[in-house]
Amino acid sequence: MDFPMFHLDWLNDRFLIAVIAILHVFINHGLAVGFIPYITWLEQKGVTNASKDQITDLNWDNLIYKKMKVAFIITTTIGAMTGVGIWFSVALVSPSSIGSLIRVFYWAWFTEWLVFVTEVILILIYFLTWKNSNTSLKAKVRHIKFGWFLSIFSWITMAIIVAILGFMMDPGNWNNEQTLLNGFTNPIYFPQLLFRTPTAMLIGGVFGMLLTTIFTKKGCDIRAKAVKYASKWILVWTPLVIIGAVFYWSVMPSAMKDNMSTAVGSMEFAQYYDLLKYFIIGTASLSVLLALFALMKPKKINFAFVIVPCVLAFGFLGIFERVREFVRKPYVIGNYMYSNLLREEDYPLYKRDGILKHATYTAITEITEENKIEAGRDVFMNLCSRCHTVNPQGVNSITYVFERMYGFGKPLDKNSMAAYIPNMHNGRTYMPPFAGNKKELDALVAYIKQVQQTGESLEGVQTSGVKINPLNSVKSVTEKLEENKDYSED
Amino acid sequence: MKLLQVNTPVPKDIPLDLPLPEWLLVILLVVSFLLHIIFINLMVGGSIITLWAQIKGLKNKEYDIFAHEIAKTITVNKSIAVVLGVAPLLSINTLYTIYFYSANALTGFVWIMIIPLVTIAFLLTYLHKYTWKNLEKNKHIHIAIMGLAVAIFLFIPLIFLTNVNLMMFPEKWGTVKGFVSALVLPNVLPRYFEFLGACIAVTGVFITWYNNRKTYPIDKIYSSFTRYHIKKIGYSIATVGLALQIFFGIIVLFTLPSKGLGYGVISIMAIAGLFLAYALWYCYQSIICPKEDIDLHFKKIAVSILIFMVFYGGSRQMYRHTALEKHQELVTAHTAEFQKLSKEARENPVEETTDLEIDESLGEIAKGSAVFNQYCAACHRTTEKLVGPPITEMASIYATDEAGLKNWIKTPGKKRADYPQMPGFSQLTDDELKELAKYILTFK
C-alpha cells in the first residue's frame, strides 16, 4: 500500500526470500554454530593426545585446520552475504513487515550486530593465527580458548535471531505492550532454541565427518581416529535433537498446526504432512546408525557413507525452515500484520473505502468498466502478489490455483471466483481475508479471467516503475490537511 | 523553503514510534557509517592497488610481492567491512524506512544482485589469495581473477549510491523505471568518482601505516624494496587519490540538486574540503622530503582525512535532512490522518449483513439457499461435479444423518482421492447450519 511493489513473476517473491534464508541457515547452523565447537574440541584433542615432546600432533592439527579453512571461507563469503541478503530480500518483498519489526527490535538487532562484530573478529583471529600458535604450548592453549569464545559468540547470535523468528510466529502479548522484552519471553522462544542448538551440533558433526573423508586417505589411521570422534559427537547430540523436536512441536499453537499440511509441500501432498516428523526421525536414526557403524568399523567409512546422512540432515533443516516460514501465515507478524502487508486493524477501513483509495501507487481512484482490468491488476498486486504469480508458468500462479479447483483448461467462471475469494481465508487459513470492497472484487476477478485468456504476466516496479495515486500526492494530501485544519479552527 | 512538486507521492509511514530519539539514531547512523566506509575504502582501494601492482609485477618481481602483501589484507578488511555495514543499514532502515525501501524496490533487480555479486567477488579474492603459488606459471589467469573481482567491486558502490540518491527525491519516483534511469539522476556519477578517489587515498595511507609497523619484517619479505621505498609508494598512491577526490568533490558540490542545499551544508562541505587539501599538501611533502623526514607528517594526514570524513558525512546527513524535511512532515500528517480514519472505521464497521441475497419466493428454504450461494456455490453445483461433489450426492449420503452433514461442514474430512481437501466452515452459526442442512437435504 505504501511501498512500491517489487515483484518476481516467475520465481515468486516468497521463494526468493526462502532460497536466501535457507542457504544462510545451512551455513550458520551447520558451519558455524554447530561446527566451530566441534573443531575446537578436535583441536584440543590434538594437544591432549600429543606425545610429551610435542605441542600438538601436527598431522592431526593440519587436518583440523583444513576443515576449519572450509568453514572459514564459506562463512565469511556465502554465509555473511546471505545474512545481509535476508535483509535485502525481505525489505524488497515485505517492506512494511521488516520496517515494523525493526522499530520494535532495534536494540535486539543492534546487540546482535555487536555480537556479530565480535564473532567476525574472533573468527579472523582464530583462523588466521592458527599456524602461528603452533610455536608454543602457551600460544596453542590461548588459541584453543579463542575457539571456545568463538563458539559461544556464534551461539549467541543464533539465540538472538531465534527470538525474532519466534516472535514473528507468536508475538505473545506484543500487541498490547509492544516492547522488546516480549520478543524474548514469547512462548516459542525456548523450545525453538532447544531444538536448534542440538540440530546445529548434529549437522556440524556429520559435515565434519564428510570433510574427513575428503581430506584423508581411505583406511589410514588418522581418518579412523577423526571418524570415531565425529561419531561420539553425533551420538551425544542426536537424542537431544529428538527431545527438542518433541518439545517444540508441543508448544506450537494449534492454529498453526492446522496449516501444517500445506506447509510441507503443496496441497496435493496434504497427506504427507507427517513428512517432517518422519524426516526428523529418519535423519536422526540414520545418523545414529552411521555413528555406531563408524565406531565399530572406522576404517570402512568413506565419502559415500557420509554423504547421504549429511544431505538428509541439511534437508531436514531446510524443511524445518520452510515449515516455520509457512505456519505463521496468514500473518507476517502474528495477529498484527497479514502477509499481504496490511495491518489487521485497518481492515474495516479497507472494507468501507476499498483499498485502491488508500494505495499510494495506483492510477485508479474510481473503478469503471474501462479501467476495470487495470484496477484488478492493482488489486492483485496489493493483495495477492506476495504469494502468487500471474505468469502461467510461475510458481504458485493464480490461474494455476484456480484451474486446479475448477478444472484445467476450462474457462474460469467469474461468479464462482467472486464467491470463493471473500471466503478463502475460512477454508484456506494460510491466506489472509480479502481486504477490498465489492467493486474491487469484481475487478480482480475480471483481471484473473483476462490473465487466463492472454497468459500475460505482471511486472514489478523494478521494471515497470510506479504510477502515483492522485489522492495520495503532495497536492491532495496538503489540501486534505488544510481542510481538516479549517474544521478544527472553526 | 523549497516547494514540493505536486506529482510527488505521499505514502504513509509505519505507525510505530522510533525505538530511540531521532538525534541519537542520526549519530549512530553517521558514526557507524563512517567506520563501515573506511573498511569499504580499504577493500575496494586494496583490490585496485593489488591489481595495479600485480600487473607491474610482471616486469618487476618486487611489485608482485607487494601485491601479494596487499591482497592478504583485502580478505580481512572485506569481512570487517561487511559486518560493520549492518549497523548503518539498520539505522537508515529505521530512520528513513519509507524512503530507503522505496528506492530499493524501484531499483529492485540490481539491488538484490548485490548479494550474489559481492559473494562472487569475495570468493574470487580468496581464490586469488590461495592460488598465488599454484598459478605462478599462469600469471595472466591469476591477474584475470583479480581483474574480475575489481570489476565487481567497482560496480557495487554505484548501486548503493544510486539508492541513497534516489531515496532523497520522492518527486522522481514516478519517473524512474529500473536501475539505469535512477543511475543517471544528477549527482550520482560525480559522487561515485569522488568515492573511488577516497578508496585510493585511504588505501595509500593504510599502506604507509601497514609497512611502518615495527613487527612487520620487511627485509624478510622483499629483496630490494625497503621500508622507505614502500612508504613512499603509499604516499604517492594517497596523493593521487586525494587529488581525484578533491577534483570530483568540487564537481559534486556544483551538481548537487538545490533541494537540500543551504548555507550550513555548503560551508561544512567546504570546511571538509579544506581538510582534504591540507592532507593532500602534506602527502605531497612526504614524497619530496628528505628520506629521514618521511614519517613526519603521517599523523597530520591521517587525522585530517578522518576529520574530513566526519565533516563530509555530517554534511551529507544535513543535506538529506533538509531535502526530506518537508516531505517527512507531510508523511507524518498523512499517517496520522489515516490512523484516525482507520479508527473511525473500526469503531463504526459497515454492517456486514453478509448481504445474503434472500429470494423469498423459495419459502422454507430461502435462507438455506442464500447461505449456500454465499459459502458453498464456489465449489458445489446442484447436479454436476465442480470442485466438490454435487448437492444431489450430498443429499444421498446424508439423507438420514443431518448431524453428520453439519459436522462435515464444520470440520470436513478427506474422502475422495481425486478431490482436493474441502475447507472447514467453523464460522457458520448454528442457525445458519440448520438452514443450510435443510436446504441440502431437500435434494433427496
Image: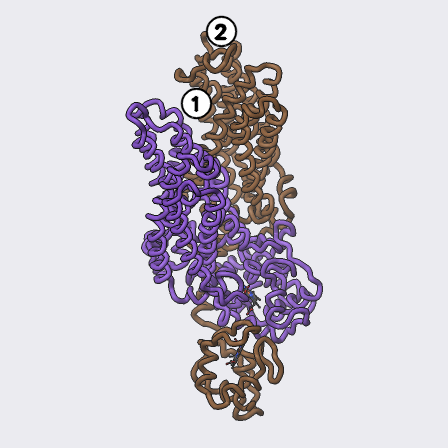
Chain colours: A purple, B brown
Q: Which residue is mark 2?
A: B290
Cα distance in 3D space between marks 2 and 1: 22 Å
- Total numbered labels: 2
Above or below, A174 against B247 in this view is: below
Discs 2 and 1 lie in a common subunit? yes
Q: Nearer the viewer, residue B177 or A202?
A: A202
Image side of residue A52 versus residue B261, left or right: left
- Is there CB contact under 8 Å for labels 2 and 1? no
User: Which mark is on residue B382?
Assistant: none
Q: Residue at x 47, y 44 (%)?
A: A83
Q: Which residue is mark 1?
A: B303
| SS of the residue under disc 2 | loop
Chain for mark 1? Answer: B
Above or below, A182 against A401 in this view is: above
Q: Residue at x 59, y 71 (%)?
A: A405
Q: Is residue B435 visible?
A: yes
